Image (cartoon, helix red, strand yellow):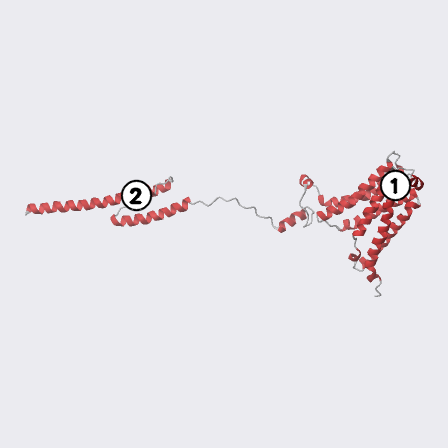
Amino acid sequence: MKLFNQTLIILLGFIASSSTASSFGTSSSSKTLFRNTIRSPSHHQAGAGRAFLNIRGGSNEEVVASTSFSTELSAQSSENTEPESTIPEPVPEPVAAVVTSKALNGMGPKAAQPGHLRKLFPSFPWYTLPNLLTYVRCIAIPGLILQFYLSTHVNKNIHSALIFAIASFTDYLDGFLARRWDICSPFGAFLDPVADKLMVSTGLILLAGKYGAVVAVPCSIILAREIAVSALREWMASRGQRDSVKVGFQGKCKTALTMTALSVILAVPDGWSVASAVKQAVGWDLVMNIGMIMLYMSAVVTVTSGSVYFKAAAPVLMDSK
């Protein structure tokens, strides 16, 4: 009986030890799986893996380890998932900032983008250039008179023509730049047409005194029209209707045609006469004939364009109130 009891105890102990060893073997393999699964080059993650291996507790160990393993994988996934490196798109400059920047440079809100010269000399006050060109045209008037009467150079007539032609070109250039850069100053709006009329009137008077009636007749027509239209605009402005007689296409054509004709006639050397031009239309005589034709055409356009202004102002002129 005693032997039987000892044998039974030994058998139960063996069974119990086998069951316990089997249990630990399962846990060990589970830990080995964890070790192989959570291996990472990150030192922090390796430390977390070793923390799993220190968990103890039989069947509850597997549940806790599984939950911790899932949590660790989620943390690892969130750590390894780095935000994509994206290049920030350029933020467009606000419209108000653009307008302010152009206003600081003296340009209007509708000004064109800077060209090569403006980029090359950004510190230059480009917004003053239209008015500077108008000043140059005004200064050219006494320069033309001095050159016309005092110069003794063999090519003095060509020099006079160059002065007048360059000054006439500034009339187009300052208007072009003012529109391109959206610049409008009260003084510039006043001085620009005045400088044009002074320049043209000076050229007409100089040539009329040199060539007599052949130039004095169209000169008188052009000057009479300029005085009449200027008076009409002044009167319409006093009535608050100046826009009714603003410069039109015919007026611009008249100005361009007159300036071109005067530039050509000024270049002709001294000694020209109508008789010589009729006999031989070659050389400078031919050039003079072309200039005279353009001058008379300018006088015709002057009359037609002036009639357009008076026709537009007729309702106000004939108003009995």
Q: Nearer the viewer, residue 296 or 203?
A: 296
Query: Under tag 2, what secondary structure?
Result: helix
Residue 53: percent from left, percent from top: 29, 43
Q: Quadrant of residue 275?
A: top right
**Furthest residue to the bottom?**
321
Residue type for callout 1: Met
Residue 194: percent from left, percent from top: 82, 49
Residue shown at the point (88%, 52%) measured from the top left: 224
Residue 87: percent from left, percent from top: 52, 44
Q: CA distance from mark 1 to mark 2?
A: 109 Å
Residue shown at the point (29%, 50%) measured from the top left: 63
Residue 91 relative to residue 210: left or right: left
Query: Which label sits on residue 33?
Result: 2
Residue count near mark 2 (Cα–Cα under 10 Å), binned few <14, some 14–19, many ≥20: few
Position of residue 237 relative to residue 36, above or below, is below
Q: Nearer the viewer, residue 256 or 192?
A: 256
**Mark 1 vs mark 2: which is more N-terminal?**
2
All told, the count of numbered labels is: 2
Question: Given this view, does label 1 or label 2 mark the residue nearer the observer?
Answer: 1
Q: Is residue 128 visible?
A: yes
Residue 236 relative to residue 16: left or right: right
**Quadrant holding the C terminus:** bottom right
Residue count near mark 1 (Cα–Cα under 10 Å), binned few <14, some 14–19, many ≥20: many
**Furthest residue to the top?**
154
Residue named by callout 1: 288
Disc 1 + disc 2, Cβ < 8 Å: no
Residue 130: percent from left, percent from top: 75, 45
Residue type for callout 2: Leu
Q: Is residue 146 visible?
A: no
Query: Under tag 1, what secondary structure?
Result: helix
